[in-house]
Amino acid sequence: GIYKDDQKYDMIHCCLRVCVSVLFLALSVHFSSSQTYVLDDKGGLGRLFDGIGGLSGGGVTEFLSQILDYLFKPNFGASLHILKVEIGGDAQTTDGTEPSHMHYENDENYFRGYEWWLMKEAKKRNPNITLIGLPWAFPAWVGRGKNWPYDYPDITASYVVNWILGAKQYHNLDIQYVGIWNERKYDIKYIKLLRYTLDKSGLDWVRIIASDNLWEPIALSVLLDPELSSAVDVIGAHYPGTTTVADALKTQKKLWSSEDYSTFNDEVGGGCWARILNQNYVNGNMTATISWNLVASYYEELPFGREGLMTAKEPWSGNYVVESPIWITAHTTQFTQPGWTYLRTVGHLAGGGSYVALTDGKGNLTVVIETMTHDHSVCIRPPLPPFHVTSQNATFQLNGSFASIKELQVWRSQFNFKTKTPSLFEKLKPLKLIDGSFTLNLSEDEVYTFTTMTTGQKGVYPDPPAPAGFPKAYKDDFNVRNPPFSEAPHFADQTGVFEYYINLTDPGPHTFTLRQVVTERPVTWVADADQTISVIGDYQWQNLTVTCDVFMESVDSGGVFIAARVNKGGESVRSANGVFFWVFADGTYKVTNDLAGQTVLAEGLSGTRAYGWNTLSLTVNGQLASGQLNGYPLWKNAVVLNPKNGWAAIGTRSFELAQFDNFAVVAD
C-alpha cells in the first residue's frame, strides 16, 4: 500500500498524488490497491547500460534515406545505439549470402556488399553509434579445404583483423567489438590468438564478444581460464529468454543479448520486443539487446519474413512500413545513452510486467514500464512460460538524488489489441510530482516512459509510395561503369556471390556483366547447396519468360542455368524446386524440376561450350515449359506439375566462375 504508518500527513499527500496523476495522465486511480515501487540511488547503482541495437546480416538489401533516419537518427525513431553487421563470408547465412572482403587468399576488396555503406550511413546520423562485426561464415581458403575455421587459427584471426583494418583504412569506421562465429562452437586457442592479433595490429581498443551462442559453456571456460578471461570482454548470448546463468554472473563480465527478437513485426512482435528490452535486464542483468534483424528488406517468402524492426521489402516501389518495434525501441533509446547506469531498484510489477530505471549520473532519470501480457508478447524463441498480467495501480517514489525531481515527461504506447487501433509512442502532458512521487493506473499491454529528458520526438515523413508488385516486365544489362554496390539490384544471392564485373577480354557487347565469383564451397554456418543461385522477382509468378545471356568459364565441367518458379531460398535452398534450364560446357543441356538436378524433365545436345556467349530463354505457361537457345527452340512441352509459382533465378552447376548479361523477365 501507499500509507506510511497511517499518518494523516502521508494520507493527504497520497491523495494529492492520485489527483495529480488523474489530472495529468487522465487515468483513474484507486489508491487503496496501489503498490509502491521505490527508485533510489542511495545504495549504489546497477550495471552500466551499453545500448539497444539492430543487426544487419543474412540478406538485408536496400535502404532509403528516410528508412535510415527512422533507424539511426537520434530523437527521431528507433534512434539505435548499436549497429552489428555480418562480416560477409560468401555463404548462405539465413536469407542470402554476403560477399567476403577476401574471396581468395591474395584478394582484398573493402567495397563489396552494403555493410560498409550501411555503417557509414548510421555513423552520419549518430556519430556515437557502437559498431560490431561478427562472422557467420568464412571463404573456403580460410579453412584450407575443411568446413572448420579453427584448424588454422592464425589465418582466421588475420582474416577477421583485416576486415577491421579495412573498415578503418577505407571507410574511417572504428569497429569497437568483434565476435567469434555466429551460433557455432568457439575455440579457446582462437579467441586468445584473435586478442593477440588485434593487439599486434594496433587494435587493442577492439573488444571481443564470445560466443554469440549460449551462456554455457563459454561462461565456465572464462571462469576456468584467466588468459581467456582477459581476452573476452563481453559474454553474448542469443535468444536468452531474458534469463542468464550463475556462471555468467560470476565472470563479472558485461552480459549482452547479442541477438534477440527475430519475430514477425506485427503488434505481437512489438510486444515481444517491449517485454524483452526491459526484462533482459530485470531478469538477466543484460545491458545490451540487439535485434535480428535491423529491417526486413528482403523477399518476404524467404525464411523469417518481416522479422525486422521495420519493413522495406520493395526497393522497386520505395514503399516501407514503420512497424511497432520502431516506436517500442524509442521508449528506451530516445531517453538513454550508452554510459548511463541502471538503478538497482528495478523489477517486476505486482500485477505483472516490469520496470527499469536509468540515470546519466548528472541528475537525469528515465523510467520504462511495460505491462505486456503473455499472448501479446510471444517471441519466436525461446518458448515463453505462462504468466499473468492484470490492470493495476502503481506508485513510484523517487528517493536519493532523484527526490527533488518536480516534473517528468511522459510517453505512452497502448497496443489496444481488442480494438486493433494501437496508439504508439504518444507524448502526454508532463507529470508534476509531489514529494518525488507519482501514481498511475496501468492497463494491460502498455509501455510508458517517464523521463527528465525533453528531447524525445516521434519523427514523421510524408507517406512513402504505395506498395506495388515487382515489375512484370524487368530487365538489366548490368552496364554500370561505377556501381554503388557490388551486387545488382533486386537479385538475392542464395548461394554463391554474383558481382558486377568488367569483362576486359570481351570489348564487344558484353563488357559489363554479372559474374558468379565463388569457386570453392565456403566454411558454412548452414548447409549451402552444391549449386550457386540468385533469385529475383515476384514469388507469386506462375507464367513467365526468362531470358539471359550466359558465359561459362570452366572448360568441360562448366554449367549454368536460368530458372522460373523457384520456390525456396535461405537455409532451405538445397531443396528448391522450380523449372531449371541448364546448359553445360560439354555440349549438353538438361531441364530439371529441382536445383539439385535430380528430377529431369528433358535433356539432350546443345553444342554449348565454355568461353562463348549463349542466349537462353525459358517460358513456363501452366503445366508446360519450353526453352530456346540463341533464338531457336531447343526443347518444348516439358510437363511441370509443381511448383505452381516462384521466383525467377540464375545460377551455376557448382562453385565456378560464370557470367550473365542482358537478363530479362516478362510475367503474365
Image (cartoon, grey):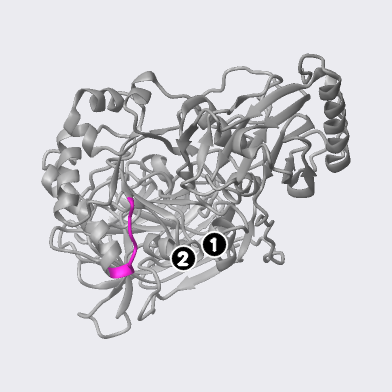
Residue 451 relative to residue 140: left or right: right
The crowd level at tag 2 (other Cα within 10 Å; few <14, some 14-19, many 20+) is some
Q: Residue at x 71, y 23 (%)?
A: 36
Residue 366 relative to residue 604: left or right: right
Of 389 and 149, nearer the camera is: 389
Can residue 256 be seen here? yes
Of 377 and 477, nearer the camera is: 377
Residue 275, given in percent of the width and then of the height, sits at 60, 32
Q: Which residues are magenta?
A: 170-176
Q: Residue at x 18, y 62 (%)?
A: 554
Provide the residue designation for mark 1.
68
Residue 73 relative to residue 593: left or right: right
Provide the residue designation for mark 2.
121
Q: Residue at x 26, y 60 (%)?
A: 101
Of 134 and 349, nearer the camera is: 349
**Is residue 155 part of the magenta span, yes or no?**
no
Amino acid marked by disc 2? Glu
Which numbered disc, 2 or 1, marks the residue that appears first in the sequence? Answer: 1
**Is residue 171 part of the magenta span, yes or no?**
yes
The crowd level at tag 1 (other Cα within 10 Å; few <14, some 14-19, many 20+) is some
Placement of the C terminus among the 4 image quadrants: bottom right
Residue 166, given in percent of the width and then of the height, sits at 25, 63
Q: Pointers 2 and 1 in contact (CB under 8 A)?
A: yes
* Kind of element beneath mark 1: helix
